[in-house]
Amino acid sequence: MRLVWQLLTVALVAFLGSQALNAVKGRPWLTLAIGLATAVLAVVAYRWVVGRTERRPVAELGRAGAVGRTSLGTLLGVVMFGFVIANIAFLGHYTVDGLGSPGGAIGLIGFMAVAAVTEELFFRGVLLRIVESRFGTWIALVFTSLLFGLTHLVNPNATLWGVIAIAIEAGGMLGAAYIATRNLWLPIGLHFGWNTAASSLFSTEVSGNGTPQGLLDAATSGPVAVSGGAFGPEGSLYAVALGALMTAVFLWIAKRRGNLVPPRRRADRADAAATLPR
């Protein structure tokens, strides 16, 4: 039941936050405020429900180092997406026509804060962590990466290739970042920095959700392998290769730190289940 309660708690905060954001659409500063407040509420709710259901300190969201790790992840996410855009632009498939919408860029930060925090709590904080504790790192990483990719099928301009790309570059990388650090702040920052750069800064499609009105008036074009097509630059081979490389780096760090968890034997899983709080 701990899995159910934790997933429901995070999902409820995400739903309420999305409803509030939709209600203030078109008002960027209010969107930013509600988005940041929802992100904070999601962290508080996660810490509360995990503490209650597992009766332990919630170390994966510890206060020590939270700002530094989140800032590092955000910077890394922005730089990574900037690298992808630079390569697409070098081939002439990303063009900037001028200034876009500064107000729109501000509002998008609020949207991306909600998405980054709630999705990381849901997929890495709850699903990956609990599945890993029973079936080991590799099964948990593959399972949650595929599931993360499949959830993007509901997006308006989703493609099968885009879903595969997200599973590799985002699901794998963000899961590996958590495994390497045993902390959610770095993957939250990575997720937020990548999405904010894609939408608020470079004004590109984000996972097939449409082209946002960000800081720049820009457009992508050309082959799907280069630009990602209607799904956005996340469907570019540049993004997939970079995400796969970062996944390998984080898993190497995890192995060096002894953070890879082997599968439990059936008897061990039964003993662990018997000791869980009901």
Image: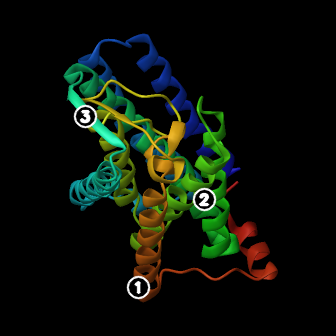
- Residue 250 x/y as whole percent: 42, 74
Q: Secondary structure at mark 3?
A: strand
Q: Residues within 10 Å of mark 3 (few under 14, many from 20)?
A: some
Q: Nearer the viewer, mark 1 or mark 3?
A: 3
* Residue placed under numbered mark 1 in the picture: 257
Q: How many marks?
A: 3
Q: Nearer the viewer, mark 3 or mark 2?
A: 3
Q: Is residue 146 above or below residue 150?
A: below
- Residue 165 x/y as whole percent: 56, 55
Residue 55 or residue 105, whichever sits in front: 105
* Residue placed under numbered mark 3 in the picture: 96
Q: Earlier in the sequence, mark 1 or mark 3?
A: 3
Q: Quadrant of the C terminus?
A: bottom right
Please give the name of the residue rendered at 79% of the width and 73% of the height, measured from the top-left corner.
270
- How far apart are the alpha carbons under marks 1 and 3? 43 Å
Q: Is residue 230 above or below residue 183?
A: above
Three-letter residue code for mark 1? Arg
